[in-house]
Amino acid sequence: AFTLDGFERLAGADPGKHAAVQALRHYQQHGYVSHAGEPKRSLLLWGSPAMGKTGSLSPLFTHLVRGGATGLWLQYNQLMAEMRNFEDGKVDARMSACQSVHYLLIDDLGDPSAAKVATDYARDVLFRIVDYRTSREMPLFITTNLSPDGLVSQFDERTARRLMAACAVIHLGGKTLR
């Protein structure tokens, strides 16, 4: 049951997942989440591994794309590997796709085990995507094991602050789902 209803049946009784389920349900019905009194068209779910971040966000993403919107779902490390593949001449096309698609989901942003900041190139790629989309109020869905402070430490304050301003930032806790 790869739907929001299915995820809610699986995890809806877990108090650590309640805020995320409510936010995703509201987004599915209205196209935004009310967060701190503001409508947010972007979502950032963060928490420990195996909490259900991807499992809760993917049914919403799938629902929106099946409804006719364009969507691109990328795992962060794969995105960075593809953006470093200069030999095929498609880096600009990949950036354009990230910037222009209606819904962009970046799964597993960052690395909580990394003791160092992201490379300059990785920070630049992420900033260009985030800045383009947030300045145009285009939806961006993010899952990460990093806390908001961890995002600042790993990527930089300007990128993390743009994400925090654009997204409904929701902690997903509770029991593991694996």
Image (tube, rainbow, N blue to C red):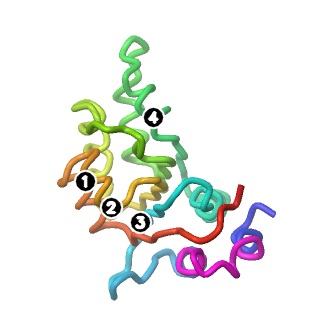
* Secondary structure category for the residue under label 4: helix
Q: Amino acid at mark 1?
A: Val
Residue 42 numbered tag: 3
* Secondary structure category for the residue under label 3: strand
17 in the magenta segment: yes
Q: Which residue is mark 4?
A: 79
Query: What residue is at 62 percent from the left and 61 percent from the top?
Result: 52
| Screen quadrant of the N terminus | bottom right
Q: Amino acid at mark 2?
A: Pro
Q: Residues within 10 Å of mark 1 (few under 14, many from 20)?
A: some
Q: Which residue is mark 2?
A: 148
Q: Name, please, the residue furthest toward the left.
A: 158
Query: Do labels 2 and 3 touch, CB within 8 Å?
Result: no
Q: Is residue 60 visible?
A: yes
Tell me the distance, in whole angstroms, between the alpha carbons under discs 4 and 3: 19 Å
Query: What residue is at 46 percent from the left and 76 percent from the top?
Result: 32
Q: Amino acid at mark 4?
A: Leu
Query: Do labels 2 and 4 touch, CB within 8 Å?
Result: no
Query: What residue is at 36 percent from the left and 36 percent from the top?
Result: 95
What segment carries the magenta color? 8-21
126 in the magenta segment: no
Q: Earlier in the sequence, mark 1 or mark 4?
A: 4
Residue 101, placed above or below residue 46: above
Q: Residue 120 at what x, y percent from top left?
A: 22, 32
Query: Do labels 4 and 3 touch, CB within 8 Å?
Result: no
* Secondary structure category for the residue under label 2: helix
Q: Which residue is mark 1?
A: 152
Residue toward you, 115 or 52? 115
Tell me the distance, in whole angstroms, between the alpha carbons under discs 1 and 4: 20 Å
Q: Earlier in the sequence, mark 2 or mark 3?
A: 3
